[in-house]
Image (cartoon, rainbow, N blue to C red):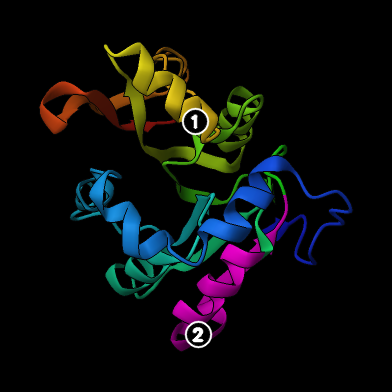
């Protein structure tokens, strides 16, 4: 399997999201547990699976990368993220796994593997921040997956409170139900459910699907 972008891509202009995470990376793991629900649940959907090549898009501080490397000791695990600051934290968190974990500093706008080589592609609270670009990222993921490979997404879905949706928008998060229909049209669902957070202030999506 050949992968494009093994060397860090050139990113001369810092985006608004990169600036956001350059600050929030300092407190990310200490604070996000309180509202990024379902991150552990999505990983449990792979019980009995044995992926050989795993990709996490928007890997952040490496929390999931480390867990995936522990759960699947035979797998190569790749994380890609736009934020160099977050990747610095991920590098420390995954150092014990050696070359089994690879980190790429770039946007995910095209497949990384030619021919398709990933058994599992994970998006954990990443796609709702790709504005624009979530549809491009999902198209790239479909092309990166081998036939029968799985995509897994946990992310914000929607809120019945306009003020909350607007506040999340200030934090670069779009949550108006835009992800689920696209996932359903591109992949065959094996898990597809909406879950309540904080007594229904918002809903989050748990989706696992196969590439046919």
Q: Is residue 92 above or below residue 28?
A: below
Q: Regarding mark 2 in the picture, which secondary structure is present there? A: helix
Instruction: Say which quadrant the C terminus sits in.
Output: top left
Instruction: State the count of labels.
Output: 2
Q: Left or right: 40 with respect to 5?
A: left
Q: Is residue 64 above or below residue 16?
A: below
Residue 13 percent coordinates (x, y): 86, 48
Residue 112 percent coordinates (x, y): 69, 49
Q: Residue furthest left?
A: 199
Residue 183 percent coordinates (x, y): 43, 21
Alpha carbon distance from label 2 to label 1: 30 Å
Q: Quadrant of residue 157?
A: top left
| Main SS of residues in magenta | helix
Q: Left or right: 36 with respect to 63?
A: left
Which numbered disc covers residue 173?
1
Instruction: Say which quadrant the N terminus sits in.
Output: bottom right
Circle 2 crowding by C-alpha within 10 Å: few under 14, some 14–19, many from 20:
few
Q: Is residue 99 magenta?
A: yes
Q: Earlier in the sequence, mark 2 or mark 1?
A: 2
Q: Which residues are magenta?
A: 85-106
Q: Residue at x 49, y 53 (%)?
A: 56
User: Dot 2 corresponds to which residue?
Assistant: 95
Q: Is residue 161 above or below residue 32?
A: above
| Label pair 2/1, CB-CB below 8 angstroms | no
Residue 70 percent coordinates (x, y): 31, 74
Q: Left or right: 12 with respect to 19?
A: right
Q: Residue at x 52, y 62 (%)?
A: 25
Q: Work out whether residue 212 can be spotted.
A: no
Q: Left or right: 123 with respect to 58?
A: left
Q: Work out whether residue 135 can be spotted.
A: yes
């Amino acid at each position: 399997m050949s992968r494009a972008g093994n060397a860090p891509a050139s990113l001369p202009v810092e985006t608004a999201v990169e600036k956001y995470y350059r600050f929030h990376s300092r407190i990310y793991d200490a604070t996000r547990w309180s509202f990024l629900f379902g991150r552990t649940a999505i990983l449990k959907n792979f019980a009995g699976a044995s992926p050989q090549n795993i990709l996490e898009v928007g890997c952040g501080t490496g929390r999931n990368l480390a867990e995936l490397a522990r759960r699947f000791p035979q797998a190569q695990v790749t994380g890609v993220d736009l934020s160099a600051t977050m990747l610095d934290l991920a590098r420390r968190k995954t150092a014990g796994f050696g070359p089994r974990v690879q980190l790429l500093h770039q946007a995910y706008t095209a497949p990384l593997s030619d021919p398709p080589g990933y058994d599992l592609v994970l998006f954990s609270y990443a796609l709702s921040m790709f504005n624009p670009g979530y549809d491009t990222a999902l198209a790239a993921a479909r092309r990166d997956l081998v036939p029968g490979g799985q995509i897994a997404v946990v992310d914000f879905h929607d809120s019945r409170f306009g003020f909350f949706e607007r506040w999340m928008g200030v934090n670069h998060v779009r949550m108006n139900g835009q992800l689920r229909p696209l996932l359903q049209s591109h992949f065959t669902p094996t898990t597809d459910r909406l879950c309540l957070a904080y007594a229904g202030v918002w809903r989050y999506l748990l989706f696992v699907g196969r590439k046919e």
